[in-house]
């Protein structure tokens, strides 16, 4: 009886896990599409930013570019915070401070740094999104394994055990019945 | 002077032409680039150990260029020698002082600062080693007192007010412009025209670029005063510069300037500022060539040799960096001058 109620509980849990799996799979396929689009756009912007940096190096020479870049004292400060969706935890990056570059760089380098900074936040958000997608994929894999294990191993095993017990009980019941019938027959012939 | 002119003619013949430069630019790696360089008057070059190859090559090309200036300065009369020294040595020294200031500002070590300097002896400044070892910017400016760079110390309060080195850098540029203009005035009228044209064009374009940069900066605090920022203006007036700073339509401003400014500044529409500098260098090349067409047996030839040498040096530095990055010819050729001259 206890096993019967346990198997009902496990089957209900499996249904919930299946729902979670389907939801995660939907979320993952949608996210992958978004990720592809955002990556493509970012690669285009990165290409433009690299061209601007390249032009600055060709115009000023490597030593001058490095000397000017080193003179920027303020740095990019970020904070890493946890966020969660459907029990899946992923990092959220909060930008606390962006470097102040106005006035310190030559105009070629200033244009290049503007291009880099315009995509910097997108790079951070994309890294965050990629990490979220990876974790959803991991969670989906885990949930799928759990559902498979429950559907293909745990529940069939438990059902087999219940059936075995049920069969045993039926057999014993039958034996008892036969035994009672035999005893009853013997008693009747004695009378 | 005659010997210097004849010598300059011979030296110009030794410079790399556009075909040689294109061959060098088409190499596939730094190693191949160095092999090509070995077949030119530069000969075999050796990279410094533990230094980035393009930085090491940049120093080699700077050294070679300074050697060329020294050779010419030794041959010319004193007034021309003074102009050439101011035009080149003081420009490089200004670059070095800029780098020392930046190094001090960002707390770089003296060794790091010294590694970033143009390899030359001090011209009008004290020892670069002493400057790079100064405890801080105040101490550095103290060392510059009593030298040609005395007035930079006057900008110390502005530097402290903004906690930024641009006021000191601007004063350095201002000093350089004033000194070069004084040297140009000492030249005979016939020799003055070409140098004035180059110096004025360079100053105008740099002023315009500073105005564009200022127009993009956040507008806070005190209003921008163009007469303070632009100490010397020629073909581009302070009124135009003020309009640019105030965010007027760049196309209108550039087109109103006429040639050669509108052609030089045209890449600003696409935001390709580096190409403006290339156009400026090409225009300098054209100016020198035109001057030589008028008289190829005087100061023009000497100046042409040094201008062409510097363009060659700048192009080779660019190619060396491009090769280190694995860039192929067409990607960076537009930023070079010598390979694109016919």
Image (cartoon, rainbow, N blue to C red):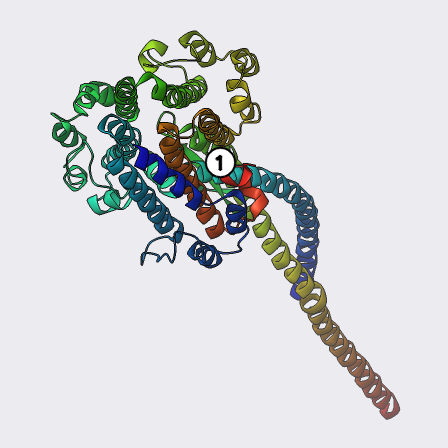
- Judge left or right: residue A186 versus residue A150: right
**Seen from this angle, which residue lies furthest right?**
A189
Residue shown at the point (36%, 46%) measured from the top left: B61
Q: Nearer the viewer, residue B250 or B215?
A: B250
Binning the other alpha carbons within 10 Å of mark 1 as few (below 14), some (14 to 19) or many (20 upward) gives: some
Q: Nearer the viewer, residue B40 or B179?
A: B40
Q: Nearer the viewer, residue B103 or B14?
A: B14
Residue B112 image point, x, y percent: 25, 45
Badge 1 sits on which subunit? A
**Seen from this angle, which residue lies furthest bottom?**
A190
Image quarter where the C terminus of chain B lies is top right
Q: Is residue B7 above or below residue B231?
A: below
Query: In terms of image quadrants, where is residue B238?
Result: top left
Q: Is residue A75 visible?
A: no
Q: Is residue B58 above or below residue B105?
A: below
- Judge left or right: residue A3 versus residue B87: right
State the SS at label 1.
helix
Residue named by callout 1: A116
Residue B306 image point, x, y percent: 37, 35
Residue shown at the point (36%, 28%) measured from the top left: B298
Q: Is residue B224 above or below residue A173?
A: above
Residue B247 image point, x, y percent: 49, 13
Residue shown at the point (55%, 38%) measured from the top left: B340
Image quarter where the N terminus of chain B lies is top left
- Judge left or right: residue B65 versus residue A40: left
Query: In terms of image quadrants, where is residue B170?
Result: top left
Q: Is residue B144 visible?
A: yes
Residue B246 image point, x, y percent: 46, 11
Query: In terms of image quadrants, where is residue A183?
Result: bottom right
Q: How many marks?
A: 1
- Judge left or right: residue B281 versus residue A189: left
**Seen from this angle, which residue lies furthest front?**
B2
């Amino acid at each position: 009886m206890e096993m019967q109620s346990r198997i009902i509980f496990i089957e209900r849990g499996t249904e919930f896990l299946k729902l979670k799996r389907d939801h995660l799979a939907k979320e993952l396929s949608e996210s992958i599409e978004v990720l592809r689009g955002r990556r493509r756009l970012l690669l285009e912007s990165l290409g433009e930013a690299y061209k601007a940096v390249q032009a600055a190096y060709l115009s000023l020479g490597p030593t001058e570019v490095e000397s000017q870049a080193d003179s920027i004292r303020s740095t990019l400060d970020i904070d890493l915070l946890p966020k969660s969706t459907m029990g899946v935890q992923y990092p959220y990056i909060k930008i606390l401070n962006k470097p102040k570059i106005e006035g310190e760089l030559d105009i070629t380098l200033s244009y290049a740094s503007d291009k880099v900074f315009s995509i910097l936040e997108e790079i951070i958000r994309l890294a965050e999104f990629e990490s979220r997608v990876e974790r959803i994929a991991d969670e989906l894999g885990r949930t799928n394994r759990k559902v498979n294990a429950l559907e293909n191993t745990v529940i069939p095993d438990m059902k087999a055990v219940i059936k075995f017990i049920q069969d045993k009980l039926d057999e014993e019941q039958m034996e008892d019945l036969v035994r009672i019938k035999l005893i009853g027959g013997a008693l009747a012939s004695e009378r | 002077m005659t010997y210097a002119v004849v010598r300059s003619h011979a030296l110009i013949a030794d410079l790399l032409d556009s075909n040689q430069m294109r061959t060098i630019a088409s190499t596939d790696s730094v190693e191949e680039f160095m092999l090509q360089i070995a077949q030119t008057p530069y000969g075999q070059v050796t990279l410094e150990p533990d230094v980035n190859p393009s930085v090491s090559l940049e120093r080699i090309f700077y050294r070679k260029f300074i050697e060329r200036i020294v050779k010419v300065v030794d041959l010319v009369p004193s007034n021309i020698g003074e102009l050439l020294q101011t035009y080149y040595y003081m420009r490089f020294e200004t670059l070095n002082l800029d780098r020392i200031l930046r190094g001090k500002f960002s707390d770089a070590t003296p060794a790091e600062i010294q590694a970033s300097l143009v390899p030359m002896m001090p011209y009008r400044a004290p020892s670069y080693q002493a400057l790079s070892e100064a405890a801080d910017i105040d101490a550095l400016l103290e060392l510059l007192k009593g030298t040609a760079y005395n007035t930079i110390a006057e900008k110390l309060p502005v530097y402290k007010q903004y906690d930024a080195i641009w006021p000191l850098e601007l004063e350095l540029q201002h000093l350089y412009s004033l000194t070069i203009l004084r040297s140009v005035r000492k030249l005979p009228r016939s020799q003055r025209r070409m140098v004035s044209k180059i110096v004025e064009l360079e100053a105008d374009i740099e002023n315009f670029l500073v105005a564009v940069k200022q127009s993009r900066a956040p507008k806070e605090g005190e209003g921008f005063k163009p007469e303070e920022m632009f100490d010397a203006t020629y073909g581009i007036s302070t009124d135009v510069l003020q309009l640019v700073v105030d965010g007027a339509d760049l196309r209108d401003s550039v087109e109103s300037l006429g040639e050669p400014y509108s052609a030089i500044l045209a890449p600003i529409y696409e935001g390709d500022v580096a190409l403006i500098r290339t156009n400026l260098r090409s225009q300098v090349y054209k100016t020198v060539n035109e001057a030589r067409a008028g008289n190829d047996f005087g100061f023009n030839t000497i100046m042409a040799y040094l201008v062409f040498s510097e363009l060659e040096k700048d192009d080779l530095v660019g190619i060396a960096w491009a090769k280190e990055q694995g860039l192929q010819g067409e990607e960076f050729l537009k930023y070079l001058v010598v390979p694109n001259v016919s």
